[in-house]
Structures are given as structure tokens and as C-alpha cells.
Image (cartoon, grey):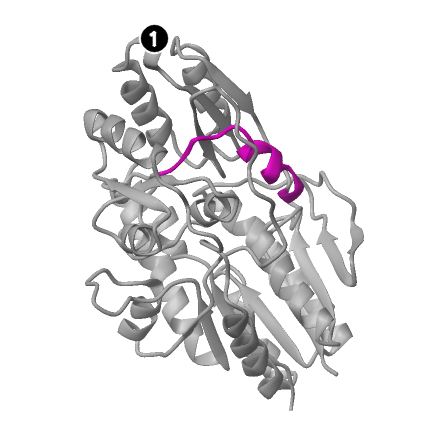
Amino acid sequence: MGQVVMLVTNACAPDPRVLRQARWLTDAGHSVTVHAFDRREEHPAEELIGDVRIVRHHLGVQTYGASFATLRGLRRFRRSALEACRRAQPDVVVCHDADTLPLARALRKQGASTVFDMHDLRHTWARIGAPNRLDRRLASRWLEQRTKQGLPHADLIVTTSGARADYDAPGLQQQIEAWGRTAMVLENRPAHGSARQAVKDSTWRVACIGRVRDVATADLLIRTLSLLPEEDRPVLRWAGDGVAANEVRQRLEASGLIVELEDGYVQEDLDRLHDGVDVAVAMYDPERGNIADGALPVRMFEAAVRGVPCVVNADVLMGDVATAEGFGVTCRWNDPQALVDALREAKAIQVPEGAGMIQVRAIALWLEALERLMA
């Protein structure tokens, strides 16, 4: 059996995609250690989750966001993670996201096979909040070039979405192909048995649950729900942490809406957070990147596996998937009246059994690909 190291630039407290993959590997008999970057130093330096060992690198409190301080912190983590890999001599190293991809060349030189798991397009995040500013555009271009330069040093590239037959919208797999490489797709869906069906109640409730990176979705929901008369207005449940969480909280508290607010949560909270929810909202400002490029946000799958329908962006891959699988309604961005109509339409949907769940065959193909690298 093989020894696998995973590298991730968050605290993995938790990172559902990383931990799902780690569990699949340990279930298959492999040894897995996750090296994570705990920027806030808020979590234990070492932790065992099942058979998965989590090692969190504490390198002084570091910043999130698009800044030079963030880049310096990431460089410090990469040096620390590379030294750990040199000591451990793993068979395979999985570089989660492009922030860890620069290590692939050095890791291959020491004899490890390398996997690049591209969750999203890192360079698009540099433009969040100010997509047309010159410094943000230059930073985005530089990050994109760095990713492209690292691709040849990955023995296997995995990403979270691919174009669907009979649909025009691209997935992230198509971006990899445009860069001259091939990638297998492993969508970011919950596994069988990881969720229960949401418990319904008599309150008309809409939820937005996930990482908060900007205020655009909150502003759209405030404008949308404010269009409805108070007697027909749903309660809004908002949950999630992130760089924009505090600003969003202030806006929601001042909105005059009935809002159920919760900050950070863990995976085990998701069943509870979906209880009583009639419709989940998984909409994003398409100018911020990734969505127009074909990202499939996990929050729409987390709702679907619990039997909760969702409203998602129109004219992108996530909309094609949600409508094709019968668990969602699409809506054009920044149109409050259209979103009112979409919420009402989605509320009437009966989500099909098994919707949103990852297929066993997809897991098997991914495992086979990694085990070939260990042979």
C-alpha cells in the first residue's frame, strides 16, 4: 500500500473535498497525511480524523485575501510543507489548489509522483471586489501564468467540473485543455451516507450557506426579499465565515428582514443548517470568476442530497447540472424580481432521490488513477 501526502493552504478544519479523498484512500488501505496551513493558528497542530493524520503548520498569524502579505505567507507554508515531504518520502503528493502546485517540480525530483487537484481557478480570486483595477488584473495574469508553468510537473491533473454533452457551457476541465493539458473530472459532491434528509417545518425559509468571499449575493437577496410583502416574505438563514462575513452580517442586520445568522460551521452542522429550509440559494456574481468558467459550487450539491431544491446562476454549467438533474432552478444574475419568481418555482420542486451525490464509479476511477502512480 502507498503513502500519500496532501497539501492544502487552508486549516483543513475541515476541507470536505480533501478529507473525502483522504478517507477514500485510507479505506483502500493507503496511509494519508494532510499538511494544512492554519493561518490563524486556531486549530490543533496535529489531529487524527479517522485514519487520516492532519498536520497543521503554525507559521505566525497570516492574512487571507489578495495581498503581498498573503503571498509571503503562502511561500512560507510551501517551504515548510516541502521540508516535511522530504522527511516523509511519500509515494504520491496531492497538491490541492494552485497555491501548492509550485512544489510539484521539487517533489518529483525527490521521487514522488504528483497530482494537481484544481478546485477552482486561483487567479480569478485576485479580482474579487475590484475586477477592473489594473493591479488586480496584473496580479490575476501573473497567478495564471504561474499555474500554467506548474502543470507540466503534475503526473495527474484532477479538477471539479467538465462540459456536459448537449450543453454549451464549459467546465474547468476545458480550461486545463486550453492550457494544453488533460484532466480527469471528480466533481465536488457529497458521498453516499454523508447526509440525511432535511426536516421540514411550517416556516417559509430561504438559506444561503457557504464561504462568504464578497457581499454581492447578500445584497441581491436583501433587494429580492424586500420586494415581497411582509406576510409573504421568507425568513433568510445565512451561515458561513470568510473574508466578507463581518460586512455581510452588518448589512443583513440592518436590512429589516428576518434573518437567522450563523458564522463558521463544520461539516457536521450541515444537516441541522438545512432543516426547515425550503430553497437554498447558490448564486454568485459572475464577474468574480470561476462561475462563468464552469465551477460547480458544492453548496448546491449539499442542499440537493438533503432534499432541498436550489436556485443557481443561469447560462453557466452549474445551471445546466441543476436543471438536468432536477434539483434546481436557474436565474439570471442581479435581477431581484426574477429571483423572487425563481424562489417560488424552486419551492415547488420535489428533489429526486440520490440527487447531488457522487457516483461510486467516479470514486473508483479516481482511486485507480492514483494507485497507478504508486505502482
Question: Tag 1's secondary structure?
Answer: helix
Give above or below for 277 relative to 77. above
Count the marks: how many? Answer: 1
Residue 87 lies left or right of residue 358; in this view the side is right
Q: Which residue is mark 1?
A: 230
> Is the residue 268 above or below the residue 4 in the image?
above
Question: Is residue 9 visible to the viewer in this orientation of the structure?
Answer: no
| Tag 1: amino acid | Glu
Q: Position of residue 223 (x, y in %)?
A: 28, 19
Front-lying residue, 291 or 132: 291
Quadrant of the rendered image containing residue 77: bottom right
The residue stretch that appears in magenta: 267-282
What x and y, as percent, mark residue 90? Answer: 71, 77
Q: Is residue 73 left or right of residue 333?
A: right
Question: Which of 261/345 is in front?
Answer: 345
Residue 248 colored in magenta in the image: no
| Quarter assignment of residue 134 | top left
Which residue is at the front of the view, 317 or 214? 317
- Count residues near mark 1 (Cα–Cα under 10 Å), then give few for <14, some for 14-19, many for 20+: few
State the quadrant of the C terminus.
Answer: bottom right
Q: Is residue 78 left or right of residue 344?
A: right
Q: Position of residue 355 (x, y in %)?
A: 45, 54
Q: Residue at x 23, y 29 (%)?
A: 341
